[in-house]
């Protein structure tokens, strides 16, 4: 009995100790817990070069003030309607007499009315007798008249149309008091003609590059020639920002200095004309005022891995910036790491810790001398030793 009680007591003690160890591991700081459970396998000595480049000779930055003109290609903006024909029948014969009436019906589909400018029927009256030709669309009369031989066009009011299937019905009027007659029309080449706007030609885009330029003022000029009967507003965006919207006059100037929407690198103009108009835009010039940025900025990217960041953040590893230049004279070098800058003084070589400037993942370092300098080596090294 005593032996069984002793085994139970020992079991309770072991369970208590095990629970205490688990609780301790869960509440201790991350670095200590990782060391205990082996989440990170840390070497006794560690050194990894995450950046190693030879920038060479770099000149100091300076600015050359002056104007810059960028010529852009011509643009055609066309949002006038384009015709699309659908043949309903090569020949139609309709008759009417006191004892019979021969009508004709045809269907056509309409999928979208939003881009529709107008729609109509075209046909040729090849032969006829007396009487009026009657034409209906979806039960609505659009013609009841005596036609002459030759080509005819009938416009269909847009409010008579519906999305989906539409029906055209053609007949000839009854003989009336001349009951002994048979009235008839023979039509050839019966077509439905849709005039639709197309967005593909209503827009245009242009791109230009601007590098190393300190911009102070910018002005865009162009000549817009209207080549359609109707006028319509033209809208212009620069890098997604609207800078112009109006019915253009022949010569147009747009001041874009206020917000300085032009970016360093690639920029984009987007043009659009509203429905009903067509413009040829020529002599497009971008006049810039500012200064060319000359001289050198050495810019380099490097990556801090998750493991390396753990060593830096939890184990106080060093992050060494190592700069070696030509010559032993002490000179100043501006260093920018991510968004933080500092000035370092170096003779032939400089070494300093930059852990506070670094981030997990992608990093960027920029260097710029105050005098022409030859940088033989630029390195970033993550290094440290495991405490014994």
Image: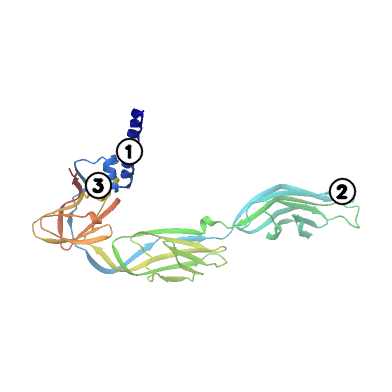
Question: Which label is found at residue 100?
Answer: 2
Residue 344, image quadrant? bottom left
Question: Where's residue 226, x and y in %?
Answer: 51, 66
Q: Is residue 240 left or right of residue 94?
A: left
- Classify mark 3: residues with Cα within 10 Å, few (<14), some (14-19) or many (20+): many
Name the residue: 41% across, 65% down. 284
Secondary structure state at the residue bearing disc 1: helix
Q: Earlier in the sequence, mark 2 or mark 1?
A: 1
Name the residue: 39% across, 58% down. 207
| In contact (CB < 8 Å): disc 2 and disc 1 | no
Name the residue: 49% across, 59% down. 203
> Alpha carbon of mark 3 to alpha carbon of mark 2: how far?
99 Å
Q: Earlier in the sequence, mark 3 or mark 1?
A: 1
Q: According to the image, label 1 marks what residue?
A: 18
Name the residue: 81% across, 58% down. 132
Asked whether the viewer can see residue 185, the reply is yes
- Mark 3 or 1: in front is 1
Question: Where's residue 91, x and y in %?
Answer: 73, 47
Asked whether the viewer can see residue 157, the reply is no
Question: Where's residue 243, x and y in %?
Answer: 44, 67
> Alpha carbon of mark 3 to alpha carbon of mark 1: how far?
30 Å
Rendered-image quadrant of the C terminus: top left
Q: Is residue 267 left or right of residue 169?
A: left
Secondary structure state at the residue bearing disc 2: loop
């Amino acid at each position: 009995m005593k032996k069984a009680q002793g085994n139970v007591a020992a079991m309770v003690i072991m369970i208590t100790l095990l629970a205490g160890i688990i609780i301790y591991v869960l509440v201790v700081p991350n670095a200590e817990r990782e060391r205990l459970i082996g989440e990170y396998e840390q070497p006794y000595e560690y050194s990894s070069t995450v950046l190693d480049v030879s920038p060479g000779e770099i000149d100091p930055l300076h600015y050359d003030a002056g104007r810059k003109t960028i010529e852009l290609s011509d643009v055609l903006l066309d949002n006038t309607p384009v015709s699309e024909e659908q043949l309903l029948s090569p020949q139609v014969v309709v008759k009417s007499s006191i004892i019979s009436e021969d009508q004709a019906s045809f269907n056509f589909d309409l999928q979208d009315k939003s881009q529709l400018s107008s729609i109509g029927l075209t046909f040729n009256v090849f032969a006829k007798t007396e009487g009026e030709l009657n034409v209906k669309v979806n039960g609505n009369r659009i013609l009841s008249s005596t036609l002459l031989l030759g080509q005819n066009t009938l416009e269909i009011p847009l409010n008579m149309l519906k999305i989906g299937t539409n029906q055209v019905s053609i007949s000839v009027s009854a003989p009336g008091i001349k009951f002994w007659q048979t009235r008839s029309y023979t039509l050839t080449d019966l077509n439905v003609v849709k005039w639709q706007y197309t967005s593909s030609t209503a827009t245009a885009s242009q791109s230009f590059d601007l590098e190393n330029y300190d911009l102070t003022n910018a002005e865009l000029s162009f000549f817009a020639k209207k080549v359609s009967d109707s006028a319509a507003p033209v809208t212009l965006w620069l890098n997604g920002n609207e800078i112009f919207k109006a019915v253009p006059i022949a010569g147009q100037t747009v001041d874009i200095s206020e917000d300085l929407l032009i970016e360093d690198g690639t920029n984009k103009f987007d043009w659009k004309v509203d429905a009903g108009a067509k413009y040829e835009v020529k002599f497009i010039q971008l006049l810039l005022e500012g200064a060319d940025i000359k001289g050198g900025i050495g810019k380099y990217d490097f990556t801090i891995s998750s493991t390396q960041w753990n060593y830096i953040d939890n184990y106080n590893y060093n992050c060494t910036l190592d700069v070696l230049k030509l010559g032993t004279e002490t000179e100043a070098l501006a260093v920018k790491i991510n968004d933080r800058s500092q000035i370092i003084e170096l003779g032939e070589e400089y070494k300093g810790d930059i852990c506070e400037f670094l981030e997990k993942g992608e990093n960027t370092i920029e260097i710029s001398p105050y005098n022409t300098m030859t940088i033989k080596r630029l390195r970033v090294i993550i290094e440290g030793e495991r405490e014994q």
